[in-house]
Image (cartoon, rainbow, N blue to C red):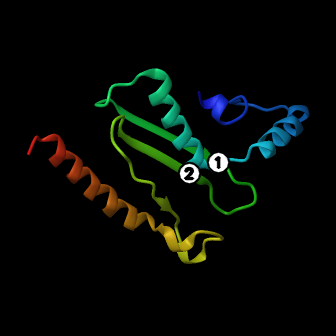
Amino acid sequence: IGESVANGSLLPVLKRRDEGELVVSAHMNPMFVEDIVREIASRLLKEMGIRDDTIVSISSESYESIHPHNAYAQIESTAGADGLMIEVHPEPNHALSDGRQQVTFAQFEKIYRKAIEIRKTMNSGL
């Protein structure tokens, strides 16, 4: 599923002669890391018949060569529940795009801890 969503093979090593073909293929179907994790999650649920109480965790990281930071996205939820999409940046005010909707790592940690508390309460049967 991951290879079909990413529009190519997942390769640990890439020979230089294959790099051009990979770049052209990626440019024909550009995807942000958040698009990749959403699509993989959606296809997993549709194609694998995962039960609603199964915990699903999917992440994707794009190793950037033109930006000073990598792009990273993760979805973690039960298969039958909606999730959170949170963009994290070390300095949102200096982000090249979408800075107003991003949170810092410290802010994300607080949000994450609160979400875990809510999840535990929901799972307790109260």
When the figure is inspected, residue 66 is found, relative to residue 32, above or below; the finding is: below
Dot 2 or dot 1: first in sequence order is: 1
Label number found at residue 62: 1
Element type where label 2 sits in the image: strand
Q: Are marks 2 and 1 in contact (CB under 8 Å)?
A: yes
Q: Quadrant of the N terminus?
A: top right
Taking the spot 40% from the left edge, 53% from the top edge, the residue there is 84
Q: How far across and how far down the image is residue 122, in percent?
A: 18, 45
Q: How far across and how far down the image is residue 98, in percent?
A: 58, 69
Q: Mark 2 Cα within 10 Å, few/some/many (few <14, many 20+)? A: some
Which residue of the protein is positioned furthest toward the bottom in this rendering? Answer: 93
Residue 49 as seen in the image, left or right of residue 111: right
Taking the spot 35% from the left edge, 60% from the top edge, the residue there is 109
Residue type pointed to by label 2: Tyr
Which residue of the protein is positioned furthest toward the top in this rendering? Answer: 48
Measure the alpha-carbon separation of dots 2 and 1: 6 Å
When the figure is inspected, residue 21 is found, relative to residue 111, above or below; the finding is: above
Q: How far across and how far down the image is residue 86, in percent?
A: 45, 58
Residue type pointed to by label 1: Ser
Residue 67 as seen in the image, left or right of residue 39: right
Of the pair 42 and 124, the residue shown nearer to us: 42
Residue placed under numbered mark 2 in the picture: 72
